[in-house]
Image (cartoon, rainbow, N blue to C red):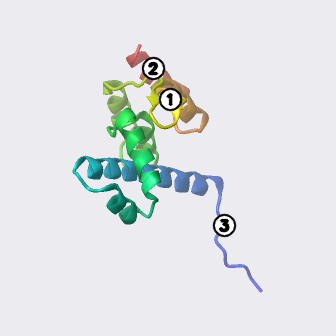
């Protein structure tokens, strides 16, 4: 009996992670915008298959962090082919909202900053050392 299950390698798993993370970022953005548009949290929760309390926490976090483009989102978009390396670097250099550590109203001090996000993305293999240098130099 042969096993017809497709082989999955590390790059397949990494791509699945990236797609899921980008979907999570987009869901957060849409939930926040729906709440800002006046949609009740219970209706949002039903639409996204989350509890109302989870929606409340997500909205509270989005209020602090914002829902504009993040370092992580831009780099992951390059990884899935939504933008070129040149476009990614241009967008990262032009980012005005370079985030320091922030205090979340629900969870307290959130770990990280835009600079730390860049370092984590380097460690994850999503950026090269040269790209990190270009990005960080633009924000000194």
Determine whether, in the image, residue 21 is placed left or right of residue 74: right
Camera sees residue 54: yes
Single out the residue that lies furthest toward the left. 37
Label 2 element class: helix
At which x and y percent is residue 72?
45, 38
Determine whether, in the image, residue 90 is placed left or right of residue 4: left
**Nearer mark to the viewer, of 2 and 3:** 2
At which x and y percent is residue 33?
28, 48
The residue beneath circle 1 is 118
Residue at position x 48%, y 50% in the image = 21
Label 1 element class: helix
Q: Find residue 7 and name its label.
A: 3
**Nearer mark to the viewer, of 1 and 3:** 1
Total labels drawn: 3
Mark with earlier residue (1, 3) = 3
The image quadrant of residue 68 is top left
The image quadrant of residue 62 is top left
Do labels 1 and 2 touch, CB within 8 Å? Answer: yes
Q: Is residue 51 above or below residue 89?
A: below
Residue at position x 45%, y 26% in the image = 102
Label 3 element class: loop
At which x and y percent is residue 46?
38, 65
At which x and y percent is residue 34?
27, 53
Determine whether, in the image, residue 68 is placed left or right of residue 133: left
Single out the residue that lies furthest toward the top. 140
Could you tell me which quadrant the C terminus lies in?
top left
Q: Find residue 136 and name its label.
A: 2
Q: Find residue 73 and name its label.
A: none
């Amino acid at each position: 009996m042969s096993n017809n299950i497709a082989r999955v390698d590390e790059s397949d798993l990494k791509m699945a992670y990236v797609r899921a993370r980008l979907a999570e970022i987009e869901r957060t953005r849409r939930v926040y915008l729906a709440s800002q548009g006046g949609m009740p949290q219970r209706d949002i929760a039903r639409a996204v298959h989350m509890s109302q309390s989870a929606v409340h926490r997500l909205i509270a976090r989005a209020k602090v962090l914002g829902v504009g483009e993040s370092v992580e989102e831009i780099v992951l978009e390059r990884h899935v082919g939504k933008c070129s390396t040149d476009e990614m670097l241009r967008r990262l250099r032009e980012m005005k909202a370079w985030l320091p550590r922030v205090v979340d109203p629900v969870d307290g001090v959130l770990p990280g900053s835009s600079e730390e996000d860049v370092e984590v993305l380097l460690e994850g293999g999503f950026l090269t050392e040269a790209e990190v240098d270009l990005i960080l130099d633009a924000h000194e």
